[in-house]
Each structure stands twice: as structure tokens, then as C-alpha cells.
């Protein structure tokens, strides 16, 4: 193996030309929708055209969010989520039966919902002496959500605890019905 050595001559000094007068340069546009809007208007687009384009963009994004929600919800429902009925009825006509409290259902479904970019929330949307209504909202990370409500009279007596129990029961019914609960001896599974 031979090694060649190359001697380099010192570089000749080159006279630099004076730069031409620079054209004014606009500041770089802001990234994202505002940058795109600014570039569109600077290129000659009108505000009405811009509004139409932005409206079309929002419609397209909403459609994509619905598709993502539906795919995520189908994937969630394909999982068999086990909910343990941890509470026993101690008196009345249902004595000896078991049921799942709201937190049992929420604790069971939350990890599966989260794996698919979904979340569930509840809000009391109507609270009157003779009627309580709870709305359950399922939301996807892409922004689409679907809501359903359930309502009814509070338990007899009208005491605050009876109202709280009614709200909790409506939330629990929502959680199990929106996610297709099916009873199964002492526990139930949420699945398609």
C-alpha cells in the first residue's frame, strides 16, 4: 500500500466584489395557519377566498376526526373489559344481588379508552327538584365527541344523598350502556 502526499499551494487571494444592494426581505412568516393565511393573501388571494379555504379545511378536519373517533371506538369495543360488581344489595326486592358502582365501571374502562385515545366525562345538565339529567360525553384526542343524556326523578325523599345517588346511578348506567355492558355472573364485560 502506498501513501501519496499532495502538497497544496497557498490559496490565492481573491478580491471580493461589493454585494449588490439587497432587496428587502420580508420576515419569515409564522408557521401554521397564520403563516399560510399570510402567504395566501400576499400571493393575491382575497379574504373571502381565504375564509372559504379555512372553512373547507375545518370541514375536512372534522370529517377526519369523526373517522378517527369511529375507528378508535370500534377498537375499544373489540376489547373485553371486565367490570367487577363489588357491591351487594342488603335489603329490598333485590337483596342478595350485586352491582357495580360508577367508580368500578370507570376504573375498568378508563385504561382501555385511553389506549385508543378516548375519554369519558359526565356532567349534570339538569338539576331540578323532580328531575335530574346527566350527560355523558365520549371524546377522542382528534377532537370529535359524542354525547348522550339520561334523566329521571331522584330517589324518593328528596334528600341531598338521594340526589347524589341518582346522579351516580345515571352516570353508571351511561358508562355501561354507552360502552355496551353485558352482565356475566358477578361481573360484566364491556364489548362489541
Image (cartoon, rainbow, N blue to C red):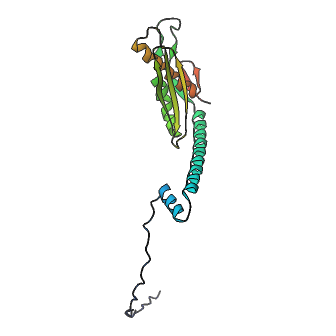
Observer-nearest of 44 and 187: 44
The answer to whether residue 32 of the structure is visible from this angle is: no
Quadrant that contains the C terminus? top right
Residue 189: x percent and y percent? 56, 26
Name the quadrant containing residue 145.
top right
In this view, 9 is above or below 85: below
Residue drawn 59% across the image and 27% down it? 180
Does residue 108 sit above or below 16 in this rendering? above
Report the residue that reaches farthest toward the right.
192
**Residue at point 51%, 30% (across, down):** 109
Query: Which sits in the foreground, 61 or 35?
Result: 35
The residue drawn where x is 58% and y is 20% is 183
Q: Nearer the viewer, residue 27 or 12?
A: 27
Q: Quadrant of residue 18?
A: bottom left
Residue 131: percent from the left, percent from the top?
A: 49, 16
The residue lying toward the viewer, choosing from 82 and 152, is 152
Is residue 102 among what the camera can see?
A: yes
Q: Residue 98, image x and y in percent?
A: 51, 15
Tally the marks. Answer: 0
The percent position of residue 191, horizontal first and vertical second, equals: 59, 29
Query: Quick check: 152 left or right of 10?
Result: right
Q: Residue at x 56, y 59 (%)?
A: 46
- Work out whether 143 lies above or below 20: above
Amino acid at each position: 500500500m502506498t501513501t501519496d502526499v499532495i502538497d497544496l499551494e497557498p490559496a490565492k487571494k481573491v478580491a471580493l466584489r461589493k454585494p449588490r444592494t439587497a432587496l428587502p426581505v420580508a420576515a419569515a412568516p409564522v408557521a401554521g395557519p397564520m403563516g399560510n393565511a399570510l402567504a395566501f393573501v400576499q400571493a393575491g388571494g382575497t379574504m373571502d377566498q381565504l375564509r372559504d379555504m379555512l372553512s373547507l379545511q375545518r370541514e375536512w378536519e372534522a370529517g377526519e376526526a369523526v373517522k378517527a373517533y369511529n375507528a378508535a371506538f370500534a377498537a375499544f369495543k373489540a376489547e373485553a373489559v371486565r367490570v367487577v360488581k363489588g357491591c351487594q344489595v342488603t335489603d329490598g326486592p333485590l337483596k342478595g344481588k350485586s352491582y357495580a358502582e360508577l367508580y368500578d365501571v370507570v376504573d375498568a374502562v378508563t385504561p382501555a379508552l385511553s389506549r385508543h385515545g378516548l375519554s369519558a366525562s359526565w356532567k349534570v345538565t339538569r338539576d331540578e327538584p323532580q328531575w335530574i339529567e346527566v350527560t355523558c360525553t365520549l371524546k377522542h384526542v382528534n377532537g370529535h365527541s359524542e354525547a348522550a343524556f339520561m334523566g329521571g326523578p331522584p330517589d324518593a325523599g328528596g334528600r341531598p344523598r338521594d340526589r347524589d345517588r341518582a346522579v351516580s346511578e345515571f352516570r353508571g348506567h351511561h358508562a355501561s350502556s354507552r360502552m355496551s355492558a353485558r352482565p356475566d355472573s358477578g361481573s360484566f364485560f364491556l364489548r362489541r
